[in-house]
Image: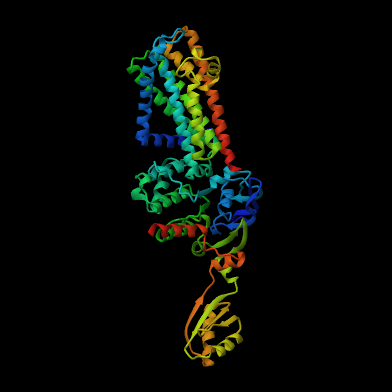
Amino acid sequence: MSADEVIVAEGLTKVFGGRRVAVDAVSFAVRRGEIFGFLGPNGAGKSTTIALLTTLLRPSAGRARVAGHDVAAEPLAVRRQIGYVSQDVAVDDLLTGRENLHFQGRLYHLGGRELRARVEAVLEMVDLAERADDLVATYSGGMRKRLDLAAGLLHRPQVLFLDEPTLGLDVQSRQRIWGYVRRLRDEEGVTVFLTTHYMEEADTLCDRVAIIDRGEIVALGSPRALKAGLRGDRVTLALEPGADAGAARRVLERLAGVQGVEGSGDGSVRLVVADGERAVPELLRALEQAGVRVASLSLQRPTLDDVFLHHTGRQLREEPADRLARALRRARRG
Amino acid sequence: MRGFLADCWWIAWRELKHFARLRPRILASVVQPLLWLTLMGNMLQRAASIPGFPAERYLDYMAPGVMVMSTLFGATTAGLGLALDLRLGYLQKLLAAPVDRLAIAAGKALAAGLQAALQGGLIFLVALALGARFAAGPAGVPLLLLLTFLPGVLFAALALSFAAWVRSHEGLMPVLNLIVLPLVFTSNVIMPASLMPAWLAALARVNPVSFAVGPLRALFLGGAEPGRAGAAAVEAVVVLAVLAAATTALAGHLLARHRD
């Protein structure tokens, strides 16, 4: 384990009831100051992995070290160094926001002036200072999530574990949470390990992403590298009426780095190219020289969804839970 | 050790805050024993004239029984509280913190014990207002509080153990319902074992509720010589404390098993 690897998992495995393999021999390392994401559908083993790393569950096989301590052998030492924000918004309705944080601080053995100062600092950070003395029962969903996040940071953990940090939040609250997580890493140097089944979250927030499916890591890397590992960007050209689509295809097929050129009946041509942004001017020049006029062009870069599809043969986007939620919304409206 | 005690205290602090914030709960904890004492006390008043009944007046007999019965209801609330923490994900937050599982169990049981003592004190005042006699006199009051605190801890730790074992709010309720009232009716809370059929009397003598009521009742009814009564009270306190500690350890152990 190198000095700046804060989390190292080797063959980490969890089997429930001797049969159901929730996490299947996963290995990865998270570097200090990194925002590292576990991306996968519900039931892929993300929460179980977090439970193993936060010492809530004991591994069935393999091992993991967090902040220099073994999760199985030294759970207490690990717990001192980490913050954990679960996907259930675990705040106490019958306490005020400030009381929630004071209680949390006591659990981490903070006290006196240090605790008071730290509580004020995190309340400021998540913009809850004004409502700090109201009972949490009166908070909105977004406020509760922010309070929960604040509780996770209170004791300045080396590693912060966020299990589905923006589950069920609206777009605005989601972006606010992303902002806090970035600031936390930039200003306090906290290493963040998060799980998500939102592709955009993994893409925009995480430095590196492990894609997990059915308990196994199927791909690991920066979102950019993962996407670049696919065949490339998809370009769709719509030709001017009367333009010669056959000629266009022949011109394009001769260009270096262009693959999978295919035409369609409506006069458009599709192709895949390694680096779309650089390739497009070249494509247009070549077509112009051949006398083919282009009406419009669209460039589609691969998403993490495409990466997931590539590795698992299934799409990440359409979650059964999301489908159910949509069906329920429709039913209520109807 | 200091860290452990501090953890216990802060866990208990949260429970006591809940208690203080839920006004209906405080009200109910006074009104309920009042109902038991007036309704049951009046209904069974003539029981005291049965030959061999150990008290002159039924109220003096019933009051300590109601105190212990209230600790059972308080224990139910503690068990359901833990199950609710589990359901809401709050328990996971406690378990992820550098806090001993035993401190989590002990803190919650401690809070239940303190509530039981408070409630015991209130029932005591109500009983006195209704005309109960307290043979031990003012000097017996601290002992009375201790003898409600300890059963409060003991029964709460038992309910917490069930909660940690069953691991569901819905599953716990029927289990506690199944246990609590039979535990009361097979004890000497309402009738002395000497007036029960033999099989029920045998149950009543091994019932921990009877055991908790015994020393409290001695404070109300008196009777034994002062030296003997003191020794019996010390013995009861020691045994209750050991049972409470063992049951709390069991609850802590069952919480620790949530890792597997």
Please report the residue visible at 51 percent of the width from the left and 16 percent of the height from the top.
B234
Please report the residue visible at 43 percent of the width from the left and 45 percent of the height from the top.
A91
A243 lies left or right of A11: left
Is residue B6 among what the camera can see?
A: no
Above or below B40: residue B21: below
Is residue B244 among what the camera can see?
A: yes
Above or below B8: residue B38: above
Above or below B179: residue A208: below
Instruction: In this rendered view, identify the residue nearer to me: A32 or A315.
Output: A315
A252 lies left or right of A124: right
Please report the residue visible at 44 percent of the width from the left and 30 percent of the height from the top.
B74
Q: Give percent across and percent down for residue B221.
A: 43, 11
Quarter occupied by residue B216: top left
Instruction: In this rendered view, identify the residue nearer to me: B215 or B56.
Output: B56
Q: Give percent across and percent down for residue A204.
A: 49, 64
Instruction: In this rendered view, identify the residue nearer to me: B33 or B193.
Output: B193
Q: Give percent across and percent down for residue A285.
A: 52, 88
Number of marks: 0
Colour scheme of the rendered structure:
rainbow
Quadrant of image for the C terminus of chain B: top right
Q: Give percent across and percent down for residue B201.
A: 53, 16
Quadrant of image for the N terminus of chain B: top right
Above or below B25: residue B240: above
